[in-house]
């Protein structure tokens, strides 16, 4: 069985929940791990267009993912 730390949808959803709770910096480790286990182009495309992550777009760590 795979660890939840390597399942992309779990990581992406955890990041979404963190943002919705106002924990913007708390979302970054989930997004960075997601980028490691997902095709980079796919991950970047999702992040760039998902409006949930608008509040993160000013962060250098987020910009590095897209």
Image: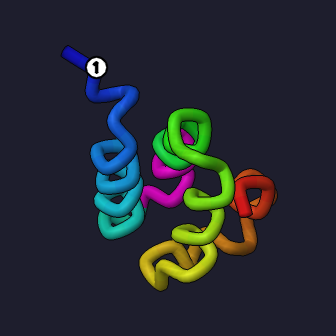
Q: At which x and y percent is residue 1?
A: 19, 15
59 sits left or right of 49 in the view:
right
Which residue is at a point 64% across and 63% down the rendered structure image?
44
Q: Please tell me how many numbered marks the rendered image carries.
A: 1
Front residue of 19/39: it is 39
58 sits left or right of 56 in the view:
right
Residue 48 falls in image quadrant: bottom right
Q: At which x and y percent is residue 36?
A: 60, 35
**Badge 1 density bin: few <14, some 14–19, many ≥20, Cα 10 Å:** few
- Above or below residue 49? Residue 21 is above
Q: Is residue 42 magenta?
A: no
Q: Is residue 24 magenta?
A: yes
- Above or below residue 56? Residue 24 is above
Judging by the rendered image, the residue that carries numbered circle 1 is: 3
10 sits left or right of 59 in the view:
left
Q: Residue furthest top?
A: 1
What kind of element bears circle 1? loop
- Above or below residue 22? Residue 4 is above
The magenta stretch is 23-29
Residue 52 falls in image quadrant: bottom left
Which residue is at a point 52% across and 70% down the rendered structure image?
46
Which residue is at a point 68% across and 73% down the rendered structure image?
57
Q: At which x and y percent is residue 33?
A: 53, 35
- Above or below residue 1? Residue 49 is below
Front residue of 14/20: it is 14
């Amino acid at each position: 069985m795979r660890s939840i730390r390597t399942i992309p949808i779990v990581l992406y959803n955890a990041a979404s929940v963190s943002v919705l709770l106002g924990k913007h910096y708390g979302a970054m480790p989930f997004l960075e791990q997601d980028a490691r286990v997902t095709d980079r182009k796919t991950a970047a495309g999702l992040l760039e267009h998902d409006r949930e992550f608008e509040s993160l777009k000013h962060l250098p760590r987020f910009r590095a993912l897209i």
